[in-house]
Amino acid sequence: MAERATIRVNGRHSPMAWLLYLTKLTVEIDGTPQTGSWGDRTISVAPGRHEVKVYFKYITKARCCEAGVTVDVADGATVSMEYRSPMMMTSPGRLAVLG
C-alpha cells in the first residue's frame, strides 16, 4: 500500500479586511498550486520534505502576501499550519507550523 501523509492549512484574515472574502487562497506544495476558499484545507501528500507556500491574488498582484515554510511530514502523520494575512497588503503573510 502507498504511504500517505497530510498537510492541513488554516487560512485566516481579519474581518476588517472584508475585500479578502472575495478572493481565493492558494496553497502551493512543491510548486503545485491549489486554489480554494479561506479556512481549513487538508491536502494529501507523500511522506517526506515539502515546501509549502500560501498566497492570494489581490487586485493586480498575483502572489499577494506570500509566506512559505519547509516541513517534514512522516508517514501517516499530519502537519498543521496556520496562514494569517497581514493588515497591509504590501507586507508578507505569516505561515506558522502548529504544535
Image (spheres, grey):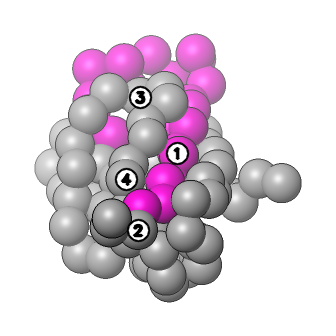
The count of marks equals 4
Tag 1 secondary structure:
strand
Q: CA distance from mark 4 to mark 2?
A: 10 Å
Q: Is residue 31 left or right of residue 39?
A: left
Residue at position x 50%, y 30% in the image: 40
Q: CA distance from mark 4 to mark 3?
A: 18 Å
Disc with the residue nearer the chain's start (4 vs 2): 2
> Tags 4 and 2 in contact by the CB under 8 Å rule?
no
Residue that label 3 marks: 38
The span picked out in magenta is 4-25
Tag 3 secondary structure:
loop
> Tags 1 and 3 in contact by the CB under 8 Å rule?
no
> Tags 4 and 3 in contact by the CB under 8 Å rule?
no
Mark closer to the observer (1, 4):
4
Q: CA distance from mark 1 to mark 2?
A: 20 Å
Residue that label 4 marks: 44
Kind of residue at disc 1? Val
Residue that label 2 marks: 3
Kind of residue at disc 2? Glu
Q: Is residue 84 left or right of residue 7?
A: right
Q: Quadrant of the N terminus?
A: bottom left
Which residue is outermost to the right? 99
Q: CA distance from mark 2 to mark 3?
A: 28 Å
Disc with the residue nearer the chain's start (1 vs 3): 1
Kind of residue at disc 4? Ser
Percent coordinates x, y for residue 59 in the rendering: 20, 41
Residue 29, above or below 13: below
